[in-house]
Image (cartoon, rainbow, N blue to C red):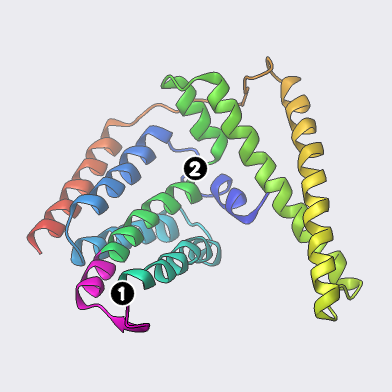
């Protein structure tokens, strides 16, 4: 299991009903798309950090790493909105700056809600909740298999990279290119083998094309639902009025 999976399965909110967490973070995600920046988005980010670090007790290092990775991607992606090519020269577009910071602010708030849900809810629980809500079995199986395969391939690629480093596979530029090509080829072969092995293993637990996970449905608390609704209304009110 990767650190994010461990954090999702070993925190104070792991056993809370998935419906409650979906209501909270789904509501924050919708609020991030609707309320104007920046105050409302800062409030959403603060609520997500409070829920993850203070209430769910997700490790700070893991949560920040999961949050900063997409934030860095958003910052890089904002470049084309800010810069414009005029007479073969890059110039800053004032209108683009306004669009960029609003887009990044909205995206960061929405990303925080999504990452916090991922850090507090195991994938197996999400898939089980989806199946109870009517998600088709083959689609849930495809999502589960793909998720497991990605985790295995990342771990395999990391192991291959480490082994090539120990054999000084990156001592020269030519050796680095050869080493990189070998790693890609090895990961491709492993992907085919591991995908077949994962599909065979999961077919022993359920019918082929289906996923069977041990995830009990926890009852939803009316008090928690009321509190969540109050939080969402408060966040939306602050975002709109400020």
In this rendered view, identify the residue nearer to me: 197 or 236. 197
Q: Residues within 10 Å of mark 1 (few under 14, many from 20)?
A: some
Residue at figure coordinates x 49%, y 34% from the top left: 126
Secondary structure beneath dot 2 equals loop
Quarter of the picture containing the C terminus is bottom left
- In magenta, the rendered stretch is 82-102
Up the image or down, 68 lies above or below 217; here it is below
Image point 92% across, 72% down: which residue?
A: 167
Q: Is residue 236 left or right of residue 218?
A: left
Q: Is residue 222 above or below residue 82?
A: above
The extreme top residue here reads 207
What percent of the width, then of the height, locates residue 27? Answer: 27, 43
Residue 76 location, quadrant: bottom left
- Closest to the observer, 26 or 61: 26
Residue at (73% x, 21% y) in the render: 203
Residue pictured at 62% horizontal, 23% vertical:
211
Say whether residue 85 is magenta: yes
Tell which residue pokes out farthest to the right in this image. 167
Which label's residue is closer to the chain start, 2 or 1? Answer: 1
- Residue 103 - label: none
The residue carrying mark 1 is: 82
| Residue placed under numbered mark 2 in the picture | 121
Q: Is residue 71 left or right of residue 221?
A: right
Give coordinates of residue 90: x percent, y percent: 35, 83
User: Is 163 inside the magenta-drawn segment?
Assistant: no
In the picture, residue 145 is in which quadrant?
top right
Residue 215 visible to the viewer:
no
Circle 2 or circle 1, nearest the eye:
1
């Amino acid at each position: 299991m990767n650190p994010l999976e461990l954090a999702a399965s070993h925190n104070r909110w792991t056993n809370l009903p998935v419906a409650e967490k979906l209501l909270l973070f789904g509501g924050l995600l919708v609020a991030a798309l609707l309320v104007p920046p920046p105050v409302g988005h800062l409030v959403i980010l603060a609520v997500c950090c409070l829920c993850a670090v203070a209430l769910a007790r997700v490790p700070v290092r893991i949560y920040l790493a999961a949050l900063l990775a997409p934030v860095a991607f958003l910052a890089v992606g904002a470049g084309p909105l800010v810069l414009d090519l005029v007479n073969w020269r890059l110039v800053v577009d004032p209108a683009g700056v306004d669009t960029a910071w609003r887009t990044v602010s909205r995206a960061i708030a929405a990303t925080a809600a999504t990452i916090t849900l991922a850090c507090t809810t195991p994938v197996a629980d999400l898939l089980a909740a989806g199946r109870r809500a009517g998600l088709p079995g083959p689609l849930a199986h495809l999502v589960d298999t793909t998720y497991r395969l990605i985790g295995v391939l990342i771990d395999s690629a990391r192991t291959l990279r480490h082994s090539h480093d120990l054999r000084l596979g990156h001592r020269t530029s030519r050796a680095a290119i050869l080493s990189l090509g070998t790693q890609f080829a090895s990961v491709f072969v492993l992907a085919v083998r591991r995908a077949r092995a994962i599909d065979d293993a999961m077919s022993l637990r359920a019918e082929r094309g289906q996923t069977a996970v041990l995830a009990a449905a926890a009852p939803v608390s009316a008090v928690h639902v009321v509190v969540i609704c109050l939080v969402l209304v408060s966040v939306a009110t602050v975002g709109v009025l400020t």
